[in-house]
Amino acid sequence: MLQINTGKLYATGIGRTNQLRGVLYTNLKLPWRDDIVTKVGTLRSTDGRTGSQALVYELEEHIEQGEDTPAILVSHTVQPYMQDFSAVASFALDAIVTPDPELTAQMTNGSPGLSSYHPPSQFLRRCFDSELYIRESDAQELVDFCEQLVGLERRLYLGAMRAIKTYVSGVHRIRDDLGLAYTLMVSAIESLAQEFDGYSSAWNDVDERKRDAIDAALESADPVAAQAVRGAILASEHLSLGRRYREFVLSHVDESYYRTGDALVGHPIAQCELVEALRQAYTLRSKYVHQIQALPHELTLPHGHSEVSYVNRQPTLTFQGLARLTRHVIRSFVHRGSKLEKETYDYSLEQSGVVVMQLAPQYWVGHPLSSPKEARRRLEGFLQQLAAVETHSADAQMTDLRPLLADIERTVAQAPKRDRHAMAVLHILFNISVAEECRSPNCDTAHEALQQYLDTLSAEALVLLCYAIDPGELWDLQVHREGHDAFFKKRSKPSGLQVPRLFEAAISLTLAERYRSVGDIEQSRALLAFAVNNYPGHAGLLAAEHSFTGDEALSWRKILLPNAVDVPREDAQEAPTESGIPQQ
């Protein structure tokens, strides 16, 4: 939000302005009677009494010029700007700056937290001191850093802000969880490395054991095909993450790192130790992420703010060393990044309070079919509406899909084979779910033509067979079972079909009834239990499981829709809804 507010991304210029003010809590003491004025806001002291932790943050908010419409934006309020500025100020001044007064008190009161018997100030120099007096040079450093930060190209700015916020979160976690704090500090730089290092994986980056096995398998293959296989593997795997982290850090560490600032205080890390220390840092990060493995004692005990400790003869960055290194690399990234005075960029979805949500089906399910590949998504939307109608949900209705179904009739023969199942099922299922007067013209003839696309069992066909297909006429029991299992295995994949829980349970109950009808009670019982597990809390399913003996048929409508009348669907129609499509 800080960069957006500068107006550099506004295509139509600045329109509305608002004077915003908020309170930040900190251990900083500003120069007496001096404000810190930056491009992203002003910090003002509240008073000079001992123990005062409040600073006033002021900002002139800039809203892009636009037409006066019912959706006009008045203000984001000060909160999102304070959140961003507090992270930037914490990072740039190596201090605690936050909108939360309790957090400031906890971090600076000198008491230990949950992660150690020692207070946070034992792990990082300066940052957790109860009072930090800011010199004019410190204030100017914040001013310069803010100017460089918001001047970055937008994608670089977003990467820098993610890294800054992750680093600050790591600092705050020192009191609660040392392993998490260390991991977050490493991850702050790793996020920059993976997005901005420009690294391309090579075949030698693949683990040697895996690489040798693949090379042996491809030895007799055509060289072009073998290279294509290797390329596909490289494109789908995350390789050399540790190496990329190390090389990114080293590329952003210059001679000043060993000659200025905290390098002149305490026990800084030596250049000859840095490469191995980075390797150790990434290893510790991985052990925490994958195994929640605690840090070695050499890092969890006070170390006099030394930047390096030796663990099993290996130089390892302490919290002090990792924090200084991380701040140096992020600063270097911001300093080197390309700067733009103006930039054409659509920031609308990056504003505070803006979220992207999936629209309800009634807003899109009936749109003209521009491509056959849209059919599966349209079927999913229609099934959401059908489930709402079946369960008598409030305001349930079905969209008139007849124009869409006309598109299907016209294009299904030329559509890719993978899309024909969804197109056929959508056409048939809609027409058998509405009153006769609301069906497509000549739908019976169309359905006879569409039957050819249902010969092969598919996820879409599994839904349809709950209504209109006798599975025994098309697929034997084993094929039906394999299709059922494949449906649930693929449901969350791009090629899968996602349907409401009502129909997932119906699919399992339909197969359970086939097993029951041939006397396989155990398989039937197992599938009934499977349906219960995947529709937790459904009273009808729980009752059916409790009373199941194998003697009575498993009707998914009676179990899942106990209030519905199990009669032919033509006789179950009610009055049309406002859209002209009747509900069940």
Image (cartoon, helix red, strand yellow):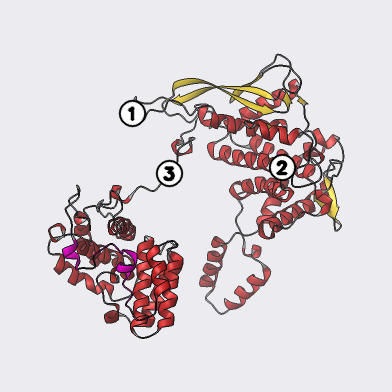
Q: Are marks 3 and 1 in contact (CB under 8 Å)?
A: no
Looking at this view, name the residue that lies furthest to the top: 33
Give the numbered dot on residue 356.
Answer: 3
Q: Identity of the amino acid at label 3?
A: Val
- Quadrant, the C terminus: bottom left
Give the mark, 3 or 1, whose residue is nearer the N terminus: 1
Measure how far apart labels 2 and 3 are at the Cα level: 33 Å
Q: Which residues are magenta?
A: 553-572
Q: Which mark's residue is nearer the viewer, 2 or 1? A: 1
Q: Identity of the amino acid at label 1?
A: Pro
Looking at this view, name the residue that lies furthest to the front: 547
The residue drawn where x is 63% and y is 39% is 165
The residue drawn where x is 43% and y is 80% is 523
Give the mark, 2 or 1, whose residue is nearer the N terminus: 1
Query: Which residue position holds label 2?
Result: 326
> Would residue 570 be counted in the magenta stretch?
yes
Give the mark, 2 or 3, whose residue is nearer the N terminus: 2
**Image quarter of residue 37:** top right
How far across and how far down the image is residue 142, in percent?
Answer: 68, 27
How far across and how far down the image is residue 421, in percent?
Answer: 30, 68
Query: Which residue position holds label 1?
Result: 70
How far across and how far down the image is residue 467, in percent?
Answer: 26, 69
Side (left or right) of 63 relative to 413: right
Q: Which mark's residue is nearer the viewer, 2 or 3? A: 3
Disc 2 packing (10 Å; few <14; some 14–19; many ≥20): many
Element carrying mark 1? loop
